[in-house]
Image (cartoon, helix red, strand yellow):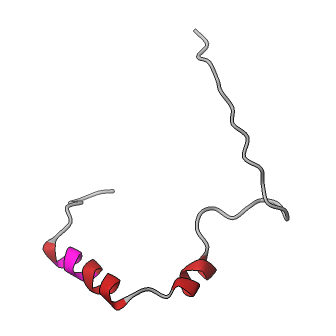
Amino acid sequence: MAGDDRVTDEQIQKWADQAEAGYDVEELKRRGRGRPGRGAEPMQVIAVRLTSAE
């Protein structure tokens, strides 16, 4: 991110006002989060451990 990344008092107040007004939980669930899956079925997470090759 370029520029000044500091959070201002005005931004904090805006976030607080939004939180106090409440959020539409159903809308947040519909939006989805993260990258969409690549296949038609849910993916399985597999843990992999790698060693450094020197």
Residue 9 in the magenta stretch? The answer is no
Q: Residue at x 72, y 46 (%)?
A: 45
Residue 4 at what x, y percent from top left? 20, 60
Is residue 44 left or right of 9 when viewed as pictured?
A: right
Magenta stretch, main secondary structure, is helix
Q: How many marks?
A: 0
Q: Nearer the viewer, residue 17 or 52?
A: 17
Residue at 29 percent of width and 78 percent of height: 15
The quadrant holding residue 38 is: bottom right
Q: Residue at x 23, y 59 (%)?
A: 3
The answer to whether 48 is drawn above or below residue 9 in the figure is above
Give the position of the C terminus as an image quadrant. Answer: top right
The quarter of the image holding the N terminus is bottom left
In the rendered view, does 19 fall on the left or right side of 33? Answer: left
Range covered by the magenta-colored residues: 10-14
Look at the picture and state if 19 lies above or below 32: below
Find the residue positioned furthest to the left.
9
Q: Quadrant of residue 48?
A: top right
Which of the two residues, 37 or 27, is positioned nearer the viewer here? Answer: 27
Give the x, y percent position of residue 10: 17, 78
* Residue at the (58%, 16%) spot, across then down: 52
Query: Outermost residue toward the top?
Result: 54
Vertical placement of residue 2 versus 22, above or below = above
Q: Position of residue 21 (x, y in %)?
A: 34, 91
